[in-house]
Image: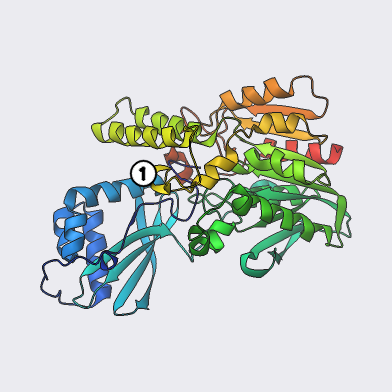
Amino acid sequence: MPRKRLLFAAFLLCVLLSVACGRKTEKLPPLQGDITELAGEFLSLLQAEDYTAAVTYFDATMKKELPPAKLQEAWETVQQQAGPYRQEVARRTEEMGRYRIMIITARFGLAQLDIRLTFNSDNRIAGLYFLPAENPVAAEYEPPSYGLPAKYSEQDVTVGQGEWALPGTLTIPDGEGLFPAVILVHGSGPQDRDETIGPNKPFKDLALGLANQGIAVLRYDKRTLVHGAKFASLPAFTVREESMDDAVAAFSLLQAESKIRDDKIFLLGHSLGGTLAPRIGAENKKLAGLIILAGAVRPLEELLLEQSRYLAEADGKVTEAEAAQLELLAQSIEHIRDPNLTADTPPAQLLNVPASYWLDLRGYNPAATARDLQLPLLILQGERDYQVTMEDFALWQDYLAGSGNATLKSYPGLNHLFQAGEGISLPAEYELQKHVDAAVIDDIARWIKAH
């Protein structure tokens, strides 16, 4: 997904609460005013890039840990990941012992974030977090032309059960059925059921477009979004906990649906979901086939470094700050690739992701796994995609050459979201509302009906 949009709820910079540090520091005088006003003033200073004034709202420990230069780096990093700041959309407060937390939900170019400001008893900021919004405010969605007129209905469903249950939507074509069906599996990060990126909702596009062609679609919010805090607190996890178990639960849900053909349930994975699709297929032989959209073959850490270099070089100049960030990223990737990597390696050395995650993916080759499956495969790729590139598509072609059950197609002009555009692809284009190209919808529908 877009720039440095990493794996989990902690994919954005978090400045730890200074109240937990336990160090004695000088006491600064209290700030006058309500925390609602103070929070708004602080955010306005960030927008104005007046970092020197912004840090005057901090307590002594925060001033020391996050001086103006580091605060600037933090704010710029957030906007590199989430797009430029747009507007505030909601506020709420929480209590945490003797601390009060002001949570400002804000819309950035590519995502909505919760800016969490922890105030101490002196009305000074003692903690600052930037996290994916817990309750994002839905952007206005204009249905694509291929989703109209609506020849389908939608119903709320629950995928899985117990502590990891997830809300979802089942889109069912009009009529009695029985209908073939598709499960949509997300890319990296805490994705919602529509795989919302800025004003774009590619999974909703897929659901409406396919349902209008007689194919049911199940989509659901990702575990790292719904249960982000609990998931992030796990000492160890893998892609099984992140994505695979919920895809299995989604399959079971569809099997129990009266209007669904239980022998015609397909799985469609996008980005990371596409990379994991062969692994899911290897464990579930009852799937009718796999549809892989922009699925990487190369290791995830290799793609992260390639994407970061691409974006740093896109304007023709790599700044000192960008070079430093690339060097730090390269160092983390060296740790990830270390043959002696163990489960005890600190996550701080591994892009803040537990070693269990990287060890689980080590040695996994999606294309080789797909080659050994006895499942129909449809592999699609946008030729303007800078996140999963034509290099990966070539690897799919190489591994599946001569396979009688694989169909591969690339689309000139389409990006990572399978939307049309021109020139080199950059995160800024995700800030404009577009839709999954109609040709992609048609190709998927045609292939499903043929299998």
Q: In this view, does 310 lie above or below 178?
A: above
Query: Residue 321 appears in which quarter of the rendering?
Result: top left
Assess disc 1: are there few (<14), some (14-19) or many (≥20) residues with their C-alpha within 10 Å of its C-alpha. Answer: some
Q: Residue at x 73, y 58 (%)?
A: 249
Q: Is residue 172 left or right of residue 11?
A: right
Query: Residue 392 appears in which quarter of the rendering?
Result: top right
Query: 233 or 13, which is in the foreground?
Result: 233
Q: Position of residue 294 (x, y in %)?
A: 61, 35
> In the rendered view of the protein, which quadrant contains the C terminus?
top right
Q: Is residue 315 left or right of residue 212?
A: left
Q: Is residue 322 left or right of residue 422?
A: left
Q: Where is residue 295 in the image (x, y as percent from the top left)?
A: 62, 35
Q: Where is residue 316 in the image (x, y as percent from the top left)?
A: 32, 24
Q: Is residue 398 above or below residue 260?
A: above
Q: In this view, does 377 lie to the left or right of 140?
A: right
- Under circle 1, the secondary element is helix
Query: 130 or 196, which is in the foreground?
Result: 130
Q: Which residue is drawn at 17% across and 52% down?
A: 68
Q: Residue at x 26, y 68 (%)?
A: 19
Query: 135 or 449, which is in the foreground?
Result: 135
Q: Which amino acid does the dot numbered 1 rest on? A: Gln
Q: Where is residue 397 in the image (x, y as percent from the top left)?
A: 69, 22
User: Label 1: which residue?
Assistant: 80
Residue 150 visible in this rendered orientation of the protein: no
Q: Which residue is drawn at 45% across and 53% down?
A: 111
Q: Which colour scheme is used?
A: rainbow
Q: In this view, does 21 lie above or below 398?
A: below
Residue 304 visible in this rendered orientation of the protein: yes
Q: How many marks?
A: 1
